[in-house]
Image (tube, rainbow, N blue to C red):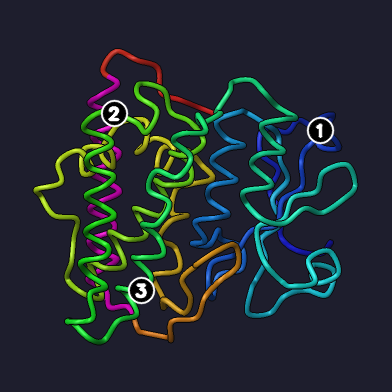
Amino acid sequence: PSSFSLCKFCSLTQTKMALEICVKAAAGAPEELGDCPFCQRVLLTLEEKNVPYKLHLIDVGNKPQWFLEVSPEGKVPVVKFDEKWIPDSDVITQLIEEKYPEPSLVTPLELASVGSKIFGSFVKFLKSKDPSDGSEQALLDELKALEDHLKAHGPYVNGEKITAIDLSLAPKLYHLEVALGHFKNWTVPEDLPYVNSYMEREKILDILVGNRSIGQLVFSDLSSSVGSIGSNDGVMPVGLIPINQSIMEKLDLFLTGAQERIERARTGKTKRHH
């Protein structure tokens, strides 16, 4: 393929062994990672398992022909396993777990649905133009359910150990916080302290901002527009809305503050490198 690619963790002798993955490129910046939370979920899984991978950044507004041949529906992410391209982040992360079982990221079956309705509720609230349509309350109800779970079983969904569900949920929560903060001047309420603490935990911040591949991943497309918000793997159009400079300034402050919190939490520790 002729697309821009990046090989993570790969020496020259390892390159052929690296998994190939197609993910969304940033809008207007085809050599930068885009904002798809489903792609982020897969990348975070690969990062946590230290699996070598070769990244193909796909301009979803101008998909290359070779990509449409391997992903006829044009959706991302897709990963190449045993010479076959596999779509759907649920399927992909399950296959990664099976092929690379250590360290285990398995989430207990009884916890698999925790937080599963938050992203759909967020999309509905973001698209809503009617303050009385109940979409805000529906989102609050889902966040409250997560709050109750974390209060009883936290700090992560499965207690002290981060698992696959956290790698799926965390990018979606950050999309929620940034997009709603800008478009609706809305943020996760302070009376949900466990949800807020979850988003602030060192490990969550680390996997989102503390390594090379994730850096600006969650937010890169916000610099130009929010043309689509993922409702499933692939994208769901919500209309082009200009982003003003203030959201990027807030983002810069957030990323700076997040990195500072990581460093403070790691006093005396060695910084993580890949």
User: How much space separates mark 2 and mark 3, taking CA atoms?
Assistant: 27 Å
| Label 1 CA crowd tier, 10 Å (few <14, some 14–19, many 20+) | few
- Type of secondary structure dominating the magenta stretch: helix
User: How much space separates mark 2 and mark 1, taking CA atoms?
Assistant: 41 Å
Residue located at (55% from left, 28% from top):
105
The magenta stretch is: 243-266
User: What is the x, y in percent for residue 128?
Assistant: 30, 81
In the rendered view, would you say 162 is above or below 25?
above
Residue located at (37% from left, 37% from top):
204
- Of the residues shown, which amino acid type is indicated by label 3? Lys
Asked whether 160 or 207 is in front, the reply is: 160
Identify the residue under disc 1. Answer: 12
Element under label 2? loop
Is there a contact, CB below 8 Å, between mark 3 and mark 1?
no
- Of the residues shown, which amino acid type is indicated by label 2? Gly
Residue located at (24% from left, 36% from top):
260
User: What is the x, y in percent for residue 14?
Assistant: 81, 30
Left or right relative to 9: residue 206:
left
Tag on residue 154?
A: 2
- Of the residues shown, which amino acid type is indicated by label 1? Leu
Identify the residue under disc 3. Answer: 124
Residue located at (47% from left, 54% from top):
217
**Is tag 2's residue or tag 3's residue first in the polypeptide sequence?**
3
Q: Nearer the viewer, mark 3 or mark 1?
A: 3
**Is tag 2's residue or tag 1's residue first in the polypeptide sequence?**
1
User: What is the x, y in percent for residue 156?
Assistant: 34, 31
